[in-house]
Image (spheres, rainbow, N blue to C red):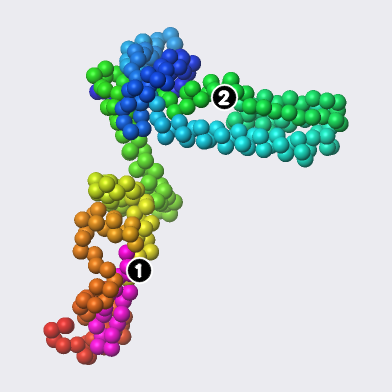
Amino acid sequence: MSKSAKVQMGETEKALIRSVSEAELQKQRLSQDHYGVKRPYTFQHGSSCHDAESVPAVALVTLSRPLRHKQRCHRAELLRQRRATLQAIATERLNQRKYKRLAYAEEQIRKQVLNQPGGEFLQVEVSGEEGQLSLTWRVDVAALQEAMVLDGKFLLITNDPSLSGAEMVARYGDKDKVEKRFRTVKGPLQLRPIFLHRDDRIEALVFVNMLALLVYSVLEIKCQRQGLAVTGEAVLKAFAHLAVVYTTFADSSVLLRVEELSDFQRKVVQALGQSWWPATAALADSAPRCSAAMWPRPAQALCSRLEETSSPALR
């Protein structure tokens, strides 16, 4: 069976990625956001280095533009935080109390800046006599540029050489759909916590949640097939507070009115093929009144009133 998987980034993999130039990648567009170039690859399969077996495969050096943007924005935020810490040390703490001592100041800078994510891209220097220390720093441009070469890039490995680069990316993108559905069960559907002890009741609860997950997934699929790129969670949140107004009249009849749909709600309704949903005004003007006996769980007084006054046709 053919597979496409992402491999961990060791030095060998990083060197393979660096061997493909940016210009070469840009010429091989696989999708709207992905580029890729194939390279031969051999990985070791086995529980230890002594019995490992060399397996030939095909590697796709892949560039994801959204991933690159995300990684660079994250790095910029880390650098901003580290420099803000250095600024606070320089203006508020240096040459105060323990920070008068050079060894202590350098130790705190290592802990708070250099050993933190993003600190590897900064060069910091503390100079001067104790009690009159000065702190300077600058961005390590060489280290930053070296890291930026790998931004948004990763290796996809397959044992099927007939797969195209686009197919490898598509199969890799599909791999975690099942895992994300289980995350949905634990998140929006809230399977946990379970306050049950009997196995049959636990099984029943899980079954009901699986049905809910099925409905959740069908909502997503139907919307996406109609070009509406939304998640099931967004649909559920949009309709969570949809109001229905029940009006009971003196003759015991009931009028149902649904509030006006928002633009997003109307798009979802249309994507689901439900073109019958009218506006509130149309319901108020044209919706027929119905007997209280036709409505679920009417008030007890309303039931008594209905038995006394309703016509045989409505009973």
User: Residue 95: percent from the left, percent from the top?
Assistant: 83, 34
In this view of the protein, can residue 162 be seen by the observer? yes
Q: Relative to residue 81, is residue 209 drawn left or right?
A: left
Q: Is residue 258 magenta?
A: yes
- Whether 31 is drawn above or below 284: the answer is above
Three-letter code, disc 1 = Ala
Q: Are marks 2 and 1 in contact (CB under 8 Å)?
A: no
In what element is the residue under mark 1? Answer: loop
Nearer to the camera, 166 or 163: 166
Label 2 Cα neighbours within 10 Å, binned few <14 / some 14-19 / many ≥20: some
**Label 2 vs label 1: CA separation?**
54 Å
Nearer to the camera, 294 or 131: 131
User: Residue 269: percent from the left, percent from the top?
Assistant: 26, 58
Three-letter code, disc 2 = Leu
Q: Earlier in the sequence, mark 2 or mark 1?
A: 2
Task: Find residue 242 and report its image quarter.
Answer: bottom left
Give the residue pinned by disc 1. 243
Q: Which residues are magenta?
A: 245-261
Residue at (77%, 40%) from the top-left corner? 92
Label 1 Cα neighbours within 10 Å, binned few <14 / some 14-19 / many ≥20: few
Residue at (26%, 19%) from the top-left corner? 160
